[in-house]
Amino acid sequence: MRVAKVIGNIWSTRKEEKLSGFKLLIVQPINVLDGSLDKAPIVAADTIGAGVGETVIVVGGSSARSAAGDMSVPVDATVVGIVDDQEIDPDVLQ
Amino acid sequence: MRVAKVIGNIWSTRKEEKLSGFKLLIVQPINVLDGSLDKAPIVAADTIGAGVGETVIVVGGSSARSAAGDMSVPVDATVVGIVDDQEIDPDVLQ
Amino acid sequence: MRVAKVIGNIWSTRKEEKLSGFKLLIVQPINVLDGSLDKAPIVAADTIGAGVGETVIVVGGSSARSAAGDMSVPVDATVVGIVDDQEIDPDVLQ
Amino acid sequence: MRVAKVIGNIWSTRKEEKLSGFKLLIVQPINVLDGSLDKAPIVAADTIGAGVGETVIVVGGSSARSAAGDMSVPVDATVVGIVDDQEIDPDVLQ
Amino acid sequence: MRVAKVIGNIWSTRKEEKLSGFKLLIVQPINVLDGSLDKAPIVAADTIGAGVGETVIVVGGSSARSAAGDMSVPVDATVVGIVDDQEIDPDVLQ
């Protein structure tokens, strides 16, 4: 899973029917070591009510469909958790 | 999912039989933060009638087959939505 | 899916039994915008009779197994079409 | 699979229900040739009791769900082994 | 599939039970055009008896589980063939 910041929303009216009812967020993957941006933002489905500004955990690939609760929903990224806290021991990398 | 611009069409006559009936689009993934190009263009199946110039949401991996409505269709990228609007709060990244 | 050039063949005698009967091609992903090389060449299974020098569409991931016609065949890239023509509108990216 | 160092923990209270009971680790993929960091850290589910500072093997994609013992658990990275030892013959790359 | 060199072995005693019985190899993906290294080495399961120094074909993603002969084995890279020979026509890229 990736850690990302929710940075916005994206709307689509003309879309695959099975996406109806899913809120689509724009999330920016970040490097937890220093908070820097990692790769381009992606679009993730939200099922837990994450809001702009929150740090979240995003699951990708077919597992995003598990997270959506229905393996036929065409999503490849889903928010699965809102981060409360993290603790990193940078000395491990020395 | 990725946000991309539809930039063209690609045609193939000699192809895997199960691809028949799918329109194949050339889509350029873009970085929604600044509109810059992100990675090389890819080929995506279209099931919702997206046209050249439109900004779309593309799903990848096995989920692209869910989007195609048949898990036996050999696609790994499918257009699942046409973007109406997006709203990004860049301050979140400061 | 990715657009690639078929640049060669690769042979393996000692291999996973279920790969028997599949021709293995070396394909070079290209950027359709300018024909430049994108990433390193990969090995793709061929089921439609693509030859060296042809421009093809390659599907990746689990969808490559759909393309091989048997989900138990251990391939992650399969040629699914030979490109006849493509049409790109570069103005869309301006 | 990737070799990674466990560098920390991450906690989420508001999360997808099926993630409950899984410890979430922050792991930093490393290049086994020289120990350098490779890509950004990711979040991996732990089912074998790996601790901070340990070198582990991480499986990604849908296989991470196999590792979690339940294909409906929405994870895309799971620790599947703690590395005891590795032996590399760098001459092979000359 | 990727072409890679087998450069070493990696051992894990405390591991996911279903990995037992699989030999784990360290393989270095290479660019077949010039033999240069491509990306960091990965860990691949071996079912065909590949040895250090051999050039192999590695399959990734869920297809690695097909190759392991059991879709519940948590692997995302498996050696599926030992390369006998390859033939590339570099003129195709001119």
Image (cartoon, coloured by chain):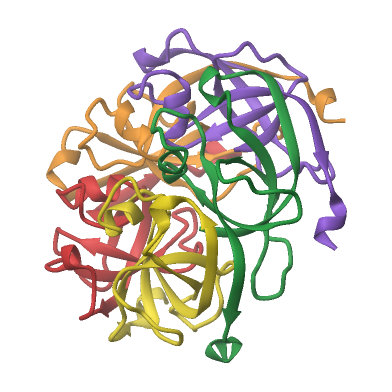
Chain colours: A purple, B orange, C red, D green, E yellow
Expressed as whole percent of the image width and height from the top left, the position of residue B58 reads 45, 32
Q: Is residue B34 above or below residue E81?
A: above
Q: Residue furthest top?
A: A21
Judge left or right: residue C12 versus residue D29.
left
Q: Which residue corresponds to the image point at 71% horizontal and 48% vertical from the top-left?
A: D51
Judge left or right: residue D61 versus residue E64.
right
Which quarter of the picture shows residue D94?
Answer: bottom right
Q: Is residue E40 above or below residue B37?
A: below
Q: Nearer the viewer, residue A27 or E13?
A: E13
Q: Which residue corresponds to the image point at 55% horizontal and 26% vertical from the top-left?
A: D19
Q: Is residue B47 above or below residue E74?
A: above
Which quarter of the picture shows residue D24?
Answer: top right
Expressed as whole percent of the image width and height from the top left, the position of residue D92 reads 53, 89
Expressed as whole percent of the image width and height from the top left, the position of residue B26 reads 40, 42
Q: Nearer the viewer, residue D78 or B42?
A: D78
Which quarter of the picture shows residue D62?
Answer: top left
Q: Which residue corresponds to the image point at 88% horizontal and 30% vertical from the top-left?
A: B94
Is residue B12 visible in the rendered structure shown here? Answer: no
Expressed as whole percent of the image width and height from the top left, the position of residue D7 reads 76, 49
